Amino acid sequence: MTSIRGSIGDMKLKQNASWALLTATSMGVRITPQSGQPVQAESLYHMQATSAESNVVSIASYLGLPVKVITNLVKGSPIAQFIRSDLAARHVSVEAHEVEQGGPWGYRHQFNIADSGYGSRGPRVHNDRAGEVGRTLNAKDFDLDRIFRIEGVQIVHLSGLIAALSPQTAKFCLEVARVAKQNGSLISFDLNHRASFWKDRDAELRTVFTEIASVSDILVGNEEDFQLALGVDGPPAGGSGLRDKLDAFKGLIASVRERFPNAQVYATTLREVLNANSHLWGAVLAVDGEWFVEEPREIHVLDRIGGGDGFVGGLLYGILREWKPEDWLRFGWASGALATTFLTDYAHPADEDQIWSIWKGNARVQR
């Protein structure tokens, strides 16, 4: 691929790369009541492989781009085998470091126990992450020189959820970012501030997140993510409405750009929940100082989990396809909306046209 359009500063896609998109993640499983009931009222469950980061890259993988996930898996675990098979079905290549379980009380993959909600009953998610194997991610277990210098990666996507899992994963994400930067990969960083992960670790994680953000080309997060994860001062949110959120985000980005001049793309979603199955869904994008807004409109929601990840995945796909920035935003908005129509945490689009039809509001049958 050649450089991204000249209006976007010096941001360029690496040519002759083996991987369009790569992410580091901690894979787990989600179990969901089959009948749409709350967890305490159900006895039959559907299990799926999941992680926020693999949700993101699935848009590009289903649409034909070469995608890789690097992760830790428990050696000999049937859950690890389930995860490998699921990612293979998504056309995602997996490079995994296998960790010995260490007995029944050793390592395992995270479990998310979540219902989808319905109407006035909102979804509930219970995270069970004790002994999570992904917390042991270590740069020495992966040949990062081969991956980034010899194979080549156009965009590496990093998430604050992984960076904050443990002190070890924080160092791991830092090393991935450094090697990616040295080898000409673009870096996408979704700040994903999670208060429970940051408890008693503010100074440590602020340093890590600040360094990753300083070399990132694409930053994703809402105004609270930027303020809490990076310590950037900005105007207080004026209220809970979508317009207030948009104004707060715009006001904050001016401060962010001063502290993190390497980044040229900033994005966030705008969401107002009318009920569990009906949301107002919008998005905003700043590219090289120019603003693009996808005004919120109503979408119908089967399961909301993964909608934000779908947005990021569609945004990155648009960048990889070298479209105009307004089309990155439109495709990201529609990819997120598509994800909420699936019971999986990720969207599996049939083709680009299916996503563009969502943006156009065309839900008519196609024969």
Image: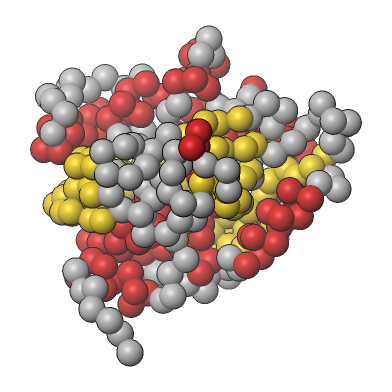
Residue 364 located left or right of residue 259: left
Q: Residue at x 43, y 69 (%)?
A: 349
- Locate residue 247: give its quadrant: top left
Q: Is residue 260 above or below residue 92?
A: above
For residue 43, which quarter of the picture? top right
Q: Nearer the viewer, residue 196 or 146?
A: 196
* Residue at x 23%, y 47% (from the top left corner): 279
Where is residue 235? Give x, y as percent: 17, 22
User: Looking at the image, which residue is at 38% across and 38% down?
Assistant: 123
Q: Position of residue 10 (x, y in %)?
A: 37, 54
Q: Is residue 158 toward the left or the right of residue 121 in the image?
A: right
Residue 208 screen position, x and y as percent: 53, 25
Q: Is residue 181 visible?
A: no
Q: How many numbered marks are there?
A: 0
Q: Does residue 79 appear anywhere in the picture?
A: yes
Quadrant including the C terminus: bottom left
Q: Is residue 119 above or below residue 319?
A: above
Closer to the camera in the image, 328 or 200? 200
Query: Eyeballing the image, is 20 above or below 187?
Result: below
> 245 left or right of 256?
left
Look at 44% across and 75% down and name the residue there: 350
Q: Height in image: 8 above or below 274?
A: below
Please identify the residue farthest to the top as the structure is shown. Answer: 200
Residue 328 in the figure: left or right of residue 182: left
Asked whether 211 or 132 is in front, the reply is 132
Report the front residue among 270 and 36: 36
